[in-house]
Image (cartoon, rainbow, N blue to C red):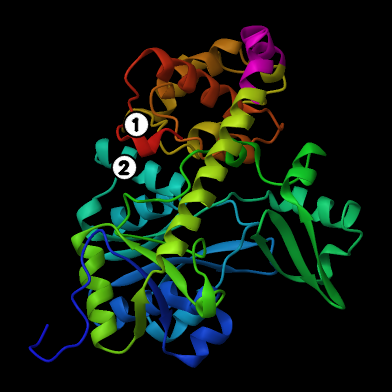
Protein backbone atom coordinates (compact mmCIF):
# COMPACT_ATOMS: atom_id res chain seq x y z
CA UNK A 1 0.00 0.00 0.00
CA UNK A 2 1.21 3.52 -0.78
CA UNK A 3 1.80 6.32 1.69
CA UNK A 4 -1.49 8.06 0.92
CA UNK A 5 -3.77 5.01 0.72
CA UNK A 6 -6.63 5.56 3.18
CA UNK A 7 -7.55 1.93 3.78
CA UNK A 8 -5.31 -0.44 5.76
CA UNK A 9 -4.13 -3.62 4.06
CA UNK A 10 -6.50 -6.58 4.26
CA UNK A 11 -4.87 -9.57 5.92
CA UNK A 12 -5.67 -13.13 6.90
CA UNK A 13 -8.16 -13.14 9.76
CA UNK A 14 -10.00 -10.01 8.62
CA UNK A 15 -13.75 -9.98 8.03
CA UNK A 16 -15.25 -7.58 5.51
CA UNK A 17 -18.37 -6.85 3.53
CA UNK A 18 -17.55 -6.94 -0.19
CA UNK A 19 -19.44 -6.27 -3.41
CA UNK A 20 -18.72 -6.06 -7.12
CA UNK A 21 -18.38 -2.71 -8.86
CA UNK A 22 -19.55 -4.15 -12.19
CA UNK A 23 -23.24 -3.57 -12.93
CA UNK A 24 -23.67 -6.66 -15.11
CA UNK A 25 -22.44 -8.97 -12.35
CA UNK A 26 -24.42 -7.12 -9.66
CA UNK A 27 -27.67 -7.55 -11.60
CA UNK A 28 -27.27 -11.31 -11.98
CA UNK A 29 -25.40 -12.31 -8.83
CA UNK A 30 -26.57 -12.64 -5.25
CA UNK A 31 -25.26 -10.88 -2.15
CA UNK A 32 -23.51 -8.15 -4.09
CA UNK A 33 -21.65 -10.45 -6.47
CA UNK A 34 -18.31 -10.35 -4.62
CA UNK A 35 -17.45 -13.99 -5.42
CA UNK A 36 -17.97 -13.55 -9.17
CA UNK A 37 -16.14 -10.21 -9.07
CA UNK A 38 -13.14 -11.79 -7.35
CA UNK A 39 -13.06 -14.73 -9.73
CA UNK A 40 -13.20 -12.40 -12.72
CA UNK A 41 -10.37 -10.25 -11.35
CA UNK A 42 -8.19 -13.33 -10.69
CA UNK A 43 -8.74 -14.66 -14.23
CA UNK A 44 -8.36 -11.30 -15.97
CA UNK A 45 -5.11 -10.56 -14.18
CA UNK A 46 -3.58 -14.01 -14.69
CA UNK A 47 -3.58 -15.00 -11.03
CA UNK A 48 -5.18 -18.18 -12.37
CA UNK A 49 -5.41 -19.79 -15.81
CA UNK A 50 -9.03 -20.87 -15.46
CA UNK A 51 -12.03 -20.81 -13.14
CA UNK A 52 -14.10 -23.87 -12.27
CA UNK A 53 -17.62 -22.79 -11.38
CA UNK A 54 -21.15 -24.15 -11.53
CA UNK A 55 -23.82 -22.67 -13.75
CA UNK A 56 -27.45 -23.36 -14.56
CA UNK A 57 -28.03 -25.81 -17.39
CA UNK A 58 -31.53 -26.47 -18.74
CA UNK A 59 -33.23 -25.22 -15.57
CA UNK A 60 -32.63 -24.60 -11.86
CA UNK A 61 -32.48 -28.37 -11.24
CA UNK A 62 -29.57 -28.82 -13.63
CA UNK A 63 -26.19 -27.74 -12.19
CA UNK A 64 -23.34 -27.92 -14.68
CA UNK A 65 -19.64 -27.73 -13.73
CA UNK A 66 -17.97 -25.31 -16.14
CA UNK A 67 -14.33 -24.45 -16.77
CA UNK A 68 -14.11 -20.78 -17.78
CA UNK A 69 -11.06 -19.23 -19.45
CA UNK A 70 -12.73 -16.09 -20.83
CA UNK A 71 -13.41 -13.55 -18.03
CA UNK A 72 -16.47 -12.23 -19.89
CA UNK A 73 -18.18 -15.61 -19.48
CA UNK A 74 -18.00 -15.61 -15.68
CA UNK A 75 -21.18 -13.56 -15.31
CA UNK A 76 -23.02 -16.65 -16.55
CA UNK A 77 -21.93 -18.54 -13.43
CA UNK A 78 -23.20 -15.92 -10.96
CA UNK A 79 -25.80 -16.94 -8.40
CA UNK A 80 -26.37 -20.13 -6.40
CA UNK A 81 -28.11 -23.41 -7.20
CA UNK A 82 -29.29 -25.24 -4.10
CA UNK A 83 -30.74 -27.99 -6.29
CA UNK A 84 -27.28 -28.71 -7.67
CA UNK A 85 -25.74 -31.65 -5.80
CA UNK A 86 -22.35 -31.88 -7.47
CA UNK A 87 -19.11 -32.74 -5.72
CA UNK A 88 -16.65 -30.45 -7.45
CA UNK A 89 -13.51 -32.12 -6.06
CA UNK A 90 -13.43 -34.94 -8.59
CA UNK A 91 -13.85 -32.43 -11.42
CA UNK A 92 -10.78 -30.62 -10.09
CA UNK A 93 -8.91 -33.92 -10.03
CA UNK A 94 -9.74 -34.55 -13.71
CA UNK A 95 -8.76 -31.00 -14.67
CA UNK A 96 -5.39 -31.26 -12.97
CA UNK A 97 -4.71 -34.65 -14.50
CA UNK A 98 -5.06 -33.10 -17.96
CA UNK A 99 -3.48 -29.73 -17.09
CA UNK A 100 -1.12 -30.32 -14.16
CA UNK A 101 0.67 -26.96 -14.46
CA UNK A 102 -2.42 -24.77 -14.77
CA UNK A 103 -3.63 -22.67 -11.85
CA UNK A 104 -7.34 -23.00 -11.16
CA UNK A 105 -9.75 -20.91 -9.07
CA UNK A 106 -12.60 -22.96 -7.62
CA UNK A 107 -15.73 -22.19 -5.61
CA UNK A 108 -16.15 -24.86 -2.93
CA UNK A 109 -18.64 -25.97 -0.31
CA UNK A 110 -17.46 -27.62 2.88
CA UNK A 111 -17.70 -31.16 1.49
CA UNK A 112 -15.87 -30.11 -1.68
CA UNK A 113 -13.07 -28.71 0.44
CA UNK A 114 -12.78 -31.78 2.65
CA UNK A 115 -12.74 -34.01 -0.42
CA UNK A 116 -9.95 -31.92 -1.96
CA UNK A 117 -7.86 -32.27 1.20
CA UNK A 118 -8.43 -36.02 1.25
CA UNK A 119 -7.50 -36.28 -2.42
CA UNK A 120 -4.38 -34.19 -1.73
CA UNK A 121 -3.30 -36.69 0.95
CA UNK A 122 -3.52 -39.38 -1.73
CA UNK A 123 -1.66 -37.16 -4.25
CA UNK A 124 -4.85 -36.90 -6.31
CA UNK A 125 -4.79 -33.09 -6.46
CA UNK A 126 -2.19 -30.35 -6.06
CA UNK A 127 -3.56 -27.77 -3.62
CA UNK A 128 -0.76 -25.29 -4.36
CA UNK A 129 -2.23 -24.74 -7.85
CA UNK A 130 -5.70 -23.98 -6.50
CA UNK A 131 -7.27 -20.69 -5.41
CA UNK A 132 -10.16 -21.78 -3.21
CA UNK A 133 -13.19 -19.52 -2.72
CA UNK A 134 -15.32 -21.11 -0.03
CA UNK A 135 -19.05 -20.50 0.18
CA UNK A 136 -21.09 -21.01 3.32
CA UNK A 137 -23.47 -23.92 2.84
CA UNK A 138 -26.72 -24.69 4.61
CA UNK A 139 -27.29 -27.71 2.39
CA UNK A 140 -28.52 -28.77 -1.01
CA UNK A 141 -31.71 -30.39 -2.29
CA UNK A 142 -31.83 -33.38 -4.61
CA UNK A 143 -33.14 -32.14 -7.98
CA UNK A 144 -35.58 -35.05 -8.36
CA UNK A 145 -36.97 -34.58 -4.86
CA UNK A 146 -37.06 -30.80 -5.34
CA UNK A 147 -39.38 -31.18 -8.31
CA UNK A 148 -41.67 -33.49 -6.33
CA UNK A 149 -41.60 -31.19 -3.30
CA UNK A 150 -42.45 -28.09 -5.33
CA UNK A 151 -45.30 -29.84 -7.07
CA UNK A 152 -46.82 -31.64 -4.06
CA UNK A 153 -46.03 -29.33 -1.13
CA UNK A 154 -45.83 -25.90 -2.74
CA UNK A 155 -48.60 -26.72 -5.24
CA UNK A 156 -46.55 -25.07 -7.98
CA UNK A 157 -45.54 -26.42 -11.38
CA UNK A 158 -41.76 -27.01 -10.97
CA UNK A 159 -41.21 -26.06 -14.61
CA UNK A 160 -42.36 -22.50 -13.87
CA UNK A 161 -39.80 -21.95 -11.06
CA UNK A 162 -36.94 -19.71 -12.19
CA UNK A 163 -35.17 -19.10 -8.86
CA UNK A 164 -34.79 -20.73 -5.47
CA UNK A 165 -32.91 -19.85 -2.29
CA UNK A 166 -32.49 -20.91 1.32
CA UNK A 167 -32.85 -17.89 3.59
CA UNK A 168 -33.94 -17.29 7.18
CA UNK A 169 -34.73 -20.95 7.70
CA UNK A 170 -36.95 -21.25 4.62
CA UNK A 171 -36.70 -22.80 1.17
CA UNK A 172 -38.03 -20.03 -1.06
CA UNK A 173 -39.06 -20.33 -4.69
CA UNK A 174 -39.84 -17.67 -7.28
CA UNK A 175 -42.08 -18.71 -10.15
CA UNK A 176 -44.25 -17.24 -12.86
CA UNK A 177 -46.82 -15.28 -10.91
CA UNK A 178 -45.36 -15.17 -7.43
CA UNK A 179 -43.04 -16.53 -4.75
CA UNK A 180 -43.45 -18.82 -1.76
CA UNK A 181 -41.37 -19.93 1.21
CA UNK A 182 -41.81 -22.86 3.59
CA UNK A 183 -39.82 -23.62 6.74
CA UNK A 184 -36.94 -26.04 6.19
CA UNK A 185 -37.87 -27.78 9.46
CA UNK A 186 -41.44 -28.27 8.27
CA UNK A 187 -40.26 -29.64 4.93
CA UNK A 188 -37.75 -32.02 6.47
CA UNK A 189 -40.15 -33.39 9.06
CA UNK A 190 -42.34 -34.29 6.06
CA UNK A 191 -39.48 -36.08 4.30
CA UNK A 192 -38.52 -33.28 1.93
CA UNK A 193 -35.99 -30.43 2.20
CA UNK A 194 -32.23 -30.90 2.15
CA UNK A 195 -30.39 -34.11 1.38
CA UNK A 196 -29.93 -36.31 4.44
CA UNK A 197 -26.14 -35.91 4.46
CA UNK A 198 -26.54 -32.10 4.37
CA UNK A 199 -28.86 -32.24 7.38
CA UNK A 200 -26.15 -34.03 9.38
CA UNK A 201 -23.28 -31.77 8.28
CA UNK A 202 -21.48 -29.66 10.89
CA UNK A 203 -19.05 -27.95 8.52
CA UNK A 204 -20.91 -24.84 7.42
CA UNK A 205 -18.18 -22.20 6.96
CA UNK A 206 -15.25 -23.54 4.88
CA UNK A 207 -12.41 -21.74 6.65
CA UNK A 208 -9.73 -23.99 5.15
CA UNK A 209 -10.38 -22.24 1.83
CA UNK A 210 -8.56 -19.00 0.99
CA UNK A 211 -11.77 -16.99 1.51
CA UNK A 212 -15.03 -18.00 3.20
CA UNK A 213 -17.96 -16.13 1.68
CA UNK A 214 -21.69 -15.94 2.28
CA UNK A 215 -24.66 -13.80 3.28
CA UNK A 216 -24.75 -14.70 6.97
CA UNK A 217 -24.00 -11.60 9.06
CA UNK A 218 -24.54 -8.91 6.43
CA UNK A 219 -26.77 -6.33 8.10
CA UNK A 220 -27.80 -2.69 7.81
CA UNK A 221 -27.77 -0.95 4.44
CA UNK A 222 -25.53 -3.70 3.02
CA UNK A 223 -28.03 -6.52 3.70
CA UNK A 224 -28.70 -8.33 0.42
CA UNK A 225 -26.22 -6.07 -1.38
CA UNK A 226 -22.89 -7.40 -0.11
CA UNK A 227 -21.08 -10.63 0.72
CA UNK A 228 -19.59 -11.41 4.12
CA UNK A 229 -15.98 -12.41 3.44
CA UNK A 230 -13.72 -14.00 6.03
CA UNK A 231 -10.11 -13.85 4.85
CA UNK A 232 -8.60 -17.24 5.70
CA UNK A 233 -5.13 -17.24 4.09
CA UNK A 234 -2.42 -14.97 2.75
CA UNK A 235 -3.40 -16.07 -0.76
CA UNK A 236 -6.97 -14.94 -0.10
CA UNK A 237 -5.77 -11.66 1.38
CA UNK A 238 -3.64 -10.99 -1.70
CA UNK A 239 -6.58 -11.61 -4.03
CA UNK A 240 -9.03 -9.36 -2.23
CA UNK A 241 -6.44 -6.62 -1.65
CA UNK A 242 -5.47 -6.48 -5.33
CA UNK A 243 -9.11 -6.59 -6.46
CA UNK A 244 -9.96 -3.65 -4.19
CA UNK A 245 -6.97 -1.65 -5.37
CA UNK A 246 -7.93 -2.28 -9.01
CA UNK A 247 -11.52 -1.21 -8.35
CA UNK A 248 -12.98 -4.63 -9.24
CA UNK A 249 -14.70 -4.88 -5.85
CA UNK A 250 -15.33 -2.57 -2.91
CA UNK A 251 -15.18 -3.44 0.77
CA UNK A 252 -15.97 -2.14 4.20
CA UNK A 253 -15.16 -3.73 7.58
CA UNK A 254 -17.84 -6.16 8.73
CA UNK A 255 -20.24 -4.75 11.31
CA UNK A 256 -19.38 -6.20 14.77
CA UNK A 257 -23.06 -7.00 15.29
CA UNK A 258 -23.04 -8.77 11.94
CA UNK A 259 -20.06 -10.86 13.02
CA UNK A 260 -21.99 -11.98 16.09
CA UNK A 261 -25.09 -12.75 14.01
CA UNK A 262 -23.00 -14.83 11.62
CA UNK A 263 -21.58 -16.75 14.56
CA UNK A 264 -25.08 -17.40 15.91
CA UNK A 265 -26.37 -18.56 12.52
CA UNK A 266 -23.45 -20.94 12.17
CA UNK A 267 -24.04 -22.21 15.70
CA UNK A 268 -27.73 -22.78 15.02
CA UNK A 269 -26.90 -24.71 11.84
CA UNK A 270 -24.41 -26.89 13.73
CA UNK A 271 -26.99 -27.64 16.44
CA UNK A 272 -29.48 -28.60 13.75
CA UNK A 273 -26.88 -30.94 12.27
CA UNK A 274 -26.27 -32.50 15.66
CA UNK A 275 -30.01 -33.01 16.08
CA UNK A 276 -30.24 -34.86 12.78
CA UNK A 277 -27.19 -36.98 13.62
CA UNK A 278 -28.79 -38.05 16.86
CA UNK A 279 -32.05 -38.86 15.12
CA UNK A 280 -30.49 -40.75 12.18
CA UNK A 281 -27.77 -42.59 14.05
CA UNK A 282 -29.86 -43.58 17.10
CA UNK A 283 -32.47 -45.24 14.90
CA UNK A 284 -29.75 -47.00 12.91
CA UNK A 285 -27.84 -48.32 15.94
CA UNK A 286 -30.73 -50.54 16.98
CA UNK A 287 -29.87 -53.04 14.24
CA UNK A 288 -27.04 -51.59 12.15
CA UNK A 289 -25.66 -54.67 10.41
CA UNK A 290 -29.00 -56.27 9.57
CA UNK A 291 -30.23 -52.90 8.29
CA UNK A 292 -27.20 -52.60 6.02
CA UNK A 293 -27.65 -56.16 4.78
CA UNK A 294 -31.33 -55.58 4.07
CA UNK A 295 -30.90 -52.27 2.29
CA UNK A 296 -27.91 -53.38 0.21
CA UNK A 297 -29.81 -56.45 -0.99
CA UNK A 298 -31.15 -54.15 -3.73
CA UNK A 299 -27.62 -53.49 -5.06
CA UNK A 300 -27.19 -54.09 -8.81
CA UNK A 301 -23.40 -53.85 -8.70
CA UNK A 302 -23.15 -50.73 -10.87
CA UNK A 303 -20.09 -49.46 -8.94
CA UNK A 304 -21.44 -45.89 -8.90
CA UNK A 305 -20.69 -45.65 -5.17
CA UNK A 306 -17.02 -46.40 -5.83
CA UNK A 307 -16.61 -44.28 -8.94
CA UNK A 308 -18.21 -41.14 -7.45
CA UNK A 309 -16.67 -41.29 -3.96
CA UNK A 310 -13.71 -38.92 -3.55
CA UNK A 311 -11.93 -41.17 -1.05
CA UNK A 312 -12.73 -44.68 -2.34
CA UNK A 313 -9.90 -45.20 -4.78
CA UNK A 314 -9.08 -48.55 -6.44
CA UNK A 315 -5.41 -49.43 -6.76
CA UNK A 316 -3.96 -47.61 -9.77
CA UNK A 317 -3.97 -49.79 -12.86
CA UNK A 318 -5.73 -52.59 -11.04
CA UNK A 319 -9.39 -51.62 -11.38
CA UNK A 320 -10.83 -54.78 -12.92
CA UNK A 321 -8.81 -57.11 -10.70
CA UNK A 322 -9.79 -55.14 -7.58
CA UNK A 323 -13.48 -55.26 -8.43
CA UNK A 324 -13.32 -59.00 -9.08
CA UNK A 325 -11.90 -59.53 -5.61
CA UNK A 326 -14.64 -57.46 -3.98
CA UNK A 327 -17.61 -59.08 -5.73
CA UNK A 328 -18.13 -62.58 -7.03
CA UNK A 329 -18.56 -62.24 -10.78
CA UNK A 330 -22.17 -62.43 -11.92
CA UNK A 331 -23.58 -62.41 -8.37
CA UNK A 332 -26.66 -60.21 -7.99
CA UNK A 333 -27.23 -58.90 -5.48
CA UNK A 334 -23.59 -59.00 -4.39
CA UNK A 335 -22.70 -60.29 -0.97
CA UNK A 336 -23.13 -57.68 1.79
CA UNK A 337 -19.36 -57.98 2.22
CA UNK A 338 -18.94 -55.91 -0.96
CA UNK A 339 -20.35 -52.90 0.87
CA UNK A 340 -18.71 -53.83 4.17
CA UNK A 341 -15.29 -53.83 2.51
CA UNK A 342 -16.00 -50.44 0.95
CA UNK A 343 -17.20 -49.02 4.28
CA UNK A 344 -14.04 -50.34 5.93
CA UNK A 345 -11.93 -48.69 3.22
CA UNK A 346 -13.46 -45.23 3.73
CA UNK A 347 -14.44 -45.49 7.41
CA UNK A 348 -11.78 -43.05 8.60
CA UNK A 349 -12.15 -40.51 5.79
CA UNK A 350 -15.78 -40.31 4.62
CA UNK A 351 -16.48 -36.60 4.08
CA UNK A 352 -20.28 -37.01 4.15
CA UNK A 353 -20.65 -35.56 0.66
CA UNK A 354 -23.57 -37.88 -0.08
CA UNK A 355 -22.53 -38.74 -3.65
CA UNK A 356 -22.78 -42.51 -3.09
CA UNK A 357 -26.39 -42.13 -1.94
CA UNK A 358 -27.35 -39.39 -4.39
CA UNK A 359 -26.19 -41.40 -7.41
CA UNK A 360 -27.20 -44.89 -6.25
CA UNK A 361 -29.48 -46.42 -8.89
CA UNK A 362 -31.38 -48.35 -6.18
CA UNK A 363 -31.77 -45.55 -3.60
CA UNK A 364 -29.73 -47.33 -0.94
CA UNK A 365 -28.93 -44.93 1.96
CA UNK A 366 -25.19 -45.49 1.60
CA UNK A 367 -24.14 -42.08 2.91
CA UNK A 368 -26.06 -42.72 6.12
CA UNK A 369 -24.21 -45.98 6.69
CA UNK A 370 -20.70 -44.72 5.93
CA UNK A 371 -21.23 -41.52 7.92
CA UNK A 372 -22.62 -43.42 10.91
CA UNK A 373 -19.66 -45.81 10.94
CA UNK A 374 -17.12 -42.98 10.63
CA UNK A 375 -18.81 -40.80 13.25
CA UNK A 376 -19.00 -43.70 15.70
CA UNK A 377 -15.28 -44.34 15.27
CA UNK A 378 -14.54 -40.63 15.79
CA UNK A 379 -16.05 -40.87 19.27
CA UNK A 380 -13.46 -43.45 20.29
CA UNK A 381 -10.43 -42.58 18.17
CA UNK A 382 -8.65 -39.46 16.94
CA UNK A 383 -10.62 -38.26 13.87
CA UNK A 384 -8.65 -38.93 10.71
CA UNK A 385 -10.09 -35.95 8.83
CA UNK A 386 -7.76 -33.70 10.78
CA UNK A 387 -8.78 -30.27 11.96
CA UNK A 388 -11.67 -29.80 14.44
CA UNK A 389 -13.63 -27.88 11.77
CA UNK A 390 -13.72 -31.10 9.81
CA UNK A 391 -16.04 -32.85 12.31
CA UNK A 392 -18.50 -33.12 9.44
Task: Tell me: 51 left or right of 240.
Answer: right
Can residue 276 be seen from the camera position used here? yes
Give the magenta range.
280-294
Q: Between marks 1 and 2, how big is the CA–CA gap?
A: 9 Å
Q: Is residue 283 magenta?
A: yes
Residue extending furthest left?
3
Task: Tell me: 106 left or right of 332.
Answer: left
Q: Name the residue under label 1.
A: 385
Residue drawn at (55%, 13%) of the image: 328
Looking at this view, is 266 or 333 the one in front? Answer: 266
Which quadrant would residue 199 be assigned to in this image? top right
Chief SS of the magenta region:
helix
Callout 1: few (<14), some (14-19), or many (20+) C-alpha neighbours within 10 Å? some
Instruction: Say what secondary structure mark 1 lies in.
Output: loop
Can residue 48 be seen from the camera position used here? no
Looking at this view, is 39 or 54 the one in front? Answer: 39
Q: Which mark is residue 117?
A: 2
Which quadrant would residue 318 be assigned to in this image? top left
In the displayed structure, would residue 351 be above or below residue 373?
below
Residue 263 at what x, y percent from top left? Answer: 46, 51
Residue 339 at what x, y percent from top left? Answer: 55, 18
Q: Quadrant for the N terminus, please.
A: bottom left
- In the rendered structure, are the residues bearing label 1 and label 2 in contact, judged by CB atoms less than 8 Å apart? yes
Residue 388 at what x, y percent from top left? Answer: 34, 34
Looking at this view, is 29 or 12 the one in front? Answer: 12
Q: Which mark is residue 199?
A: none
Q: Which of marks 1 and 2 is nearer the N terminus?
A: 2
Residue 48 at what x, y percent from top left? Answer: 26, 71
Amino acid sequence: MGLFDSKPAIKAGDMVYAWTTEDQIAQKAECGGAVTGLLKYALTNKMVDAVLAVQKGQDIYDAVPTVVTDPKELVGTAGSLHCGTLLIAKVVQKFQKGSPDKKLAVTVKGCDLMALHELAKRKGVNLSNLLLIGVNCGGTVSPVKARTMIRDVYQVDPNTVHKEEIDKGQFIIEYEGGHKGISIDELEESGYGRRSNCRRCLYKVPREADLACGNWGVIGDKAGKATFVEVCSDKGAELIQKAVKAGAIATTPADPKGIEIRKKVEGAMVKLGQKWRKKDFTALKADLWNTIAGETSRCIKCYSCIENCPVCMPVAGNGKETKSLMVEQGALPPSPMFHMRRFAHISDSCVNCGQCEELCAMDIPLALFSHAIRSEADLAFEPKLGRPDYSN
